[in-house]
Image: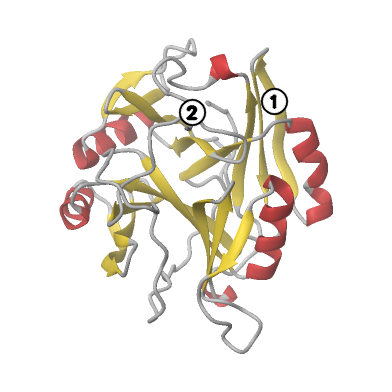
Amino acid sequence: MVVKTLVLLLAGALALPVSAAEMPPINSPATADYFSGKFVWADLFTADQAAAEKFYTGLFGWTSTIVERENGQGEHDYIVLSNADRPIAGIARLRSDRMPGPTRGRWVHYISVPDVAQALRAAVAGGGHVRFPAKDLPLRGTQAIFTDADGAYVGLLHSSSGDPGEYRPDAGDWTWSELFARDPSAASLYYHTALAYEVLPDSRLNRPDTFLLISGTYARASVVPLSAQPNAKPAWLGFVRVTSLKDALARVPGLGGRILVGPKHLDADNHLAIIADPVGAAIGLVEHTESAVVNPDSLPSKP
């Protein structure tokens, strides 16, 4: 989805949960399938895990599982969020002093790569910066976080249990990722060079400054212009598919969130909005018909 909007994500130090407890695998049972360039996981770094858990389970019907023990102050190091028993995201604890200001949370989305260390070197060579170096985590695999040449946070992951399959997204699944960039053409070239994406103009829109990032013949994400407003910062935004955008947005205020943009009706088949959770982390919602799903003809339904 392409949205002409402002995404506010303030910079702050992130720390992945890497204590002795084992992180859960991406796939169970494990597979040998890998889809380089696919977004395969997401972590929410937040100063209020309890509020985040209540918000996302209430909004999407996700279930939560506490993976690491309580730290004695009512907080947990890591919580796994699942959609229909399929793990799709985690909630990691972030000290509030590491992200001061009104926004005290951030989603980081992870891209599948065959070699995390090599991908990090390419990211840095193109002007990026390592925020969390490559780390081997029991069961999970190797992962890292960097900021691209424009300052947008993104993760890398080589799963030890294979990647999720190439299926059409169900309600509650991540369905699209979008990069808001100061110069979409330059940002697209950066990801082409660093992560080997094929770059094509987004033919769905009649404008020259939006692009698709493609790998394995599938469109994985779009790159769009950042708002010209002075407080707008380059950022990745993930979208979750919902059955009814109207119903989902009606739940947002009661769960402590805010509606930032929308609802926007792009056409008869695509309706979207951008919201903020209780600590300000941004996330997108989209309602669309089966025919409007990106890659509709090539992606099978889940078995």
To which quarter of the image does residue 298 belong?
A: top left
Spatial separation of the CA atoms under disc 1 and disc 2: 22 Å
Q: How is the image coloured?
A: secondary structure
- Is 191 placed above or below 138 here? above
Task: Give whichever of 203, 112 is nearer the camera.
Answer: 112
Q: Position of residue 8 (x, y in %)?
A: 58, 48
Comparing labels 1 and 2, the label whose residue is closer to the camera: 2
Q: Which mark is on residue 14?
A: none
Left or right, residue 95 beside residue 116: right
Contact, CB < 8 Å: mark 1 with mark 2?
Answer: no
Position of 280 compared to 259: left or right? left
- Which residue, given by chain and number where applicable, does mark 1 sit on? 264
Residue at (58%, 61%) from the top-left corner? Answer: 105
Residue visible at 75% across and 39% down in the picture: 248
Crowd band around label 1 with a 10 angstrom C-alpha radius: few (<14), some (14–19), many (20+): some
Q: Residue furthest bottom?
A: 72
Closer to us: 241 or 282: 241
The spot of residue 3 in percent (x, y) is 57, 28
Q: Is residue 217 left or right of residue 258?
A: left
Residue bearing the label numbered 2? 168
Give the mark count.
Answer: 2
Residue 109 falls left or right of residue 103: left
Point 66% across, 61% down: residue: 52
